[in-house]
């Protein structure tokens, strides 16, 4: 069995909390649309703890029933309330128990886990923060002395215990105590200090509610941002494209090949239905591939005369806009032209700029490079040019 299934949680919510003002005790007052105690319960459930016992004032029975968890009536003091809950759990004793103030709704999962982890090595562990402010004694509105703060801690909950040890400590100590650590120590138990959290505040005054509301809103915003980031990071796509165009006949006085949107002077142009920009066609197909949207031929059929001699930028722009309309950002494109001639190197900067402009991205995200095929094959015999391309899309 796991530590979590062997651990019970007691939420102490029996107090009448008059310092808050208002008609309801503080643990039942509204915080961000729910009773404070409902937030406290959620904090422990988020840590994977399912066995939760509420200690309530008998007047709050109908409110407790609405929370759907077992509850026991508390006693005349905090210690008596905790003892009532421990005795109720003793019928089916857990191995460990966390005892927590119902009016501390902001304990984090990390804090709860720290306390549980410490219980592996010690019978008792509780969170606290070292006192960092200077301490004074005062009377009549004046400072009457200073108090060294060394070794002083601000105690928090959840306070964690081996169940048998704290049950027996409570049975030996029927009097009131500040908290369960005092009772554990009275029974001779060692209590380890675990690092507490500034946000784990005990709602006592109206200003505490305001602060708790701000913290909850910040956590909700952080949660939705990280959930959104996770979703978008999950849809990263890579598509590839490949294309070949043959060279047309030699043109007296020379002509141009259109490659990646740039006119490159050469003795022969490339043959094809459109402007035959082999690099741009490969890249366009890579984007369609990443979107699982077929290829250029499906979007711009060669049988349709309107694409005869067309500027291939129309095709690439269409693919890039389709990606954007699906919520994708083109984060990278890489094109390799394979040919002996014309020499591509002097034109790559212009090609990158041309492709980037058509796709609406920065040139730094676009690569164009070239290779020969060592005079082998159709590219080696200068019958045509081949191009391969890869495009990476990320859902924005
Ligand atoms: Mg083509």
Image: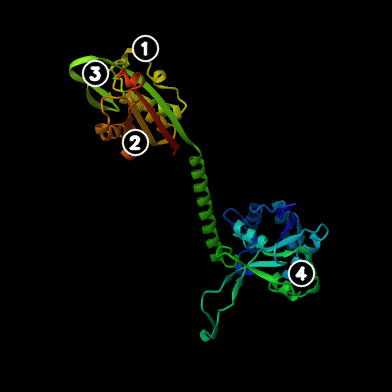
Q: Which residue is mark 2?
A: 366
Name the secondary structure under disc 3.
strand
Q: For marks 1 and 2, give the CA distance.
A: 31 Å
Q: Which residue is mark 3?
A: 268
Q: Nearer the viewer, mark 1 or mark 4?
A: 1
Q: First in sequence, mark 4 or 2: give its number.
A: 4
- Given this view, does label 4 or label 2 mark the residue nearer the observer? 2
The answer to whether marks 1 and 3 mark residues whose Cβ atoms lie closer than 8 Å is: no
205 or 251, which is in the foreground?
251
Write the residue at 78% across / 71% down. Answer: 169
Left or right, 44 with reference to 307: right
Q: Are marks 1 and 4 in contact (CB under 8 Å)?
A: no
Q: Earlier in the sequence, mark 1 or mark 4?
A: 4
The local crowd at label 3, few if under 14, some if 14 to 19, many if 20 or more residues have their Cα within 10 Å, is: many
Mark 3 or mark 1, which is nearer the start of the sequence?
A: 3
Q: Which residue is mark 1?
A: 303
Residue occupying the far left of the picture: 253
Q: If you read the primary sequence from the N terminus, does the residue marked by circle 3 or circle 2 appear first?
A: 3
Residue 38 in the image: state x and y as whole percent: 65, 55
Residue at x-position 81% and y-position 70%: 171
Work out whether residue 44 can be spotted.
yes
Q: State which quarter of the image contains the C terminus.
A: top left
- The reply to whether callout 1 and callout 2 are in contact (CB within 8 Å) is no
Q: Mark 3 vs mark 4: which is more N-terminal?
A: 4
The label on residue 29 is: none
Which label sits in the foreground, 1 or 3?
Answer: 3
Given contact means CB atoms under 8 Å apart, are the residues at marks 3 and 2 in contact? no
Give the image quarter of residue 186: bottom right
Tell me, for residue 80, which label it has, or none: 4
Cα gap from disc 4 to disc 2, whole angstroms: 71 Å
Q: Is mark 2 within 8 Å of ligand 1?
A: no
């Amino acid at each position: 069995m796991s530590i979590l299934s062997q651990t019970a949680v007691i939420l102490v919510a029996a107090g009448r909390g008059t310092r808050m003002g208002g008609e309801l005790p503080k643990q039942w007052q509204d915080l961000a649309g729910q009773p404070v105690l409902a937030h406290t319960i959620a904090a422990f459930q988020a840590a994977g703890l399912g066995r939760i016992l509420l200690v309530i004032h008998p007047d709050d029975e109908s409110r407790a029933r609405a929370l759907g968890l077992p509850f026991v009536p508390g006693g005349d003091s905090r210690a008596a309330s905790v003892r009532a809950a421990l005795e109720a759990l003793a019928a089916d004793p857990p191995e460990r128990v966390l005892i927590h103030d119902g009016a501390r709704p902001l304990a984090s999962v990390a804090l709860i886990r720290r306390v549980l982890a410490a219980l592996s090595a010690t019978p008792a562990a509780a969170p606290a923060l070292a006192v960092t402010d200077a301490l004074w004694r005062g009377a009549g509105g004046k400072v009457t002395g200073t108090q060294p703060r060394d070794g002083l801690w601000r105690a928090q909950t959840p306070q964690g215990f081996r169940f048998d040890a704290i049950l027996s400590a409570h049975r030996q100590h029927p009097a009131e105590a500040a908290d369960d650590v005092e009772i554990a120590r009275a029974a001779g138990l060692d209590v380890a200090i675990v690092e507490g959290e500034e946000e784990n505040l005990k709602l006592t005054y109206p200003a505490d509610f305001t602060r708790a509301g701000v913290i909850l809103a910040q956590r909700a915003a952080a949660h939705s941002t990280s959930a959104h980031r996770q979703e978008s990071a999950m849809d990263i796509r890579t598509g590839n494209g490949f294309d070949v165009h043959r060279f047309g006949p030699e043109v007296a006085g020379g002509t141009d090949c259109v490659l990646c949107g740039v006119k490159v002077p050469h003795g022969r142009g490339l043959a094809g239905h459109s402007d035959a920009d082999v690099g741009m066609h490969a890249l366009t197909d890579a984007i369609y591939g990443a979107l699982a949207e077929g290829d250029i031929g499906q979007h711009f059929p060669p049988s349709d005369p309107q694409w005869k001699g067309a500027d291939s930028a129309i095709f690439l722009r269409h693919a890039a806009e389709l990606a954007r309309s699906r919520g994708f950002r083109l984060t990278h494109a890489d094109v390799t032209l394979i040919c002996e001639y014309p020499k591509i190197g002097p034109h790559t900067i212009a090609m990158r700029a041309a492709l980037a402009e058509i796709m609406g991205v920065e040139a730094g995200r676009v690569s164009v490079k070239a290779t020969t095929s060592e005079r082998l094959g159709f590219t080696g015999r200068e019958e045509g040019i081949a191009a391969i391309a890869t495009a990476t899309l990320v859902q924005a």
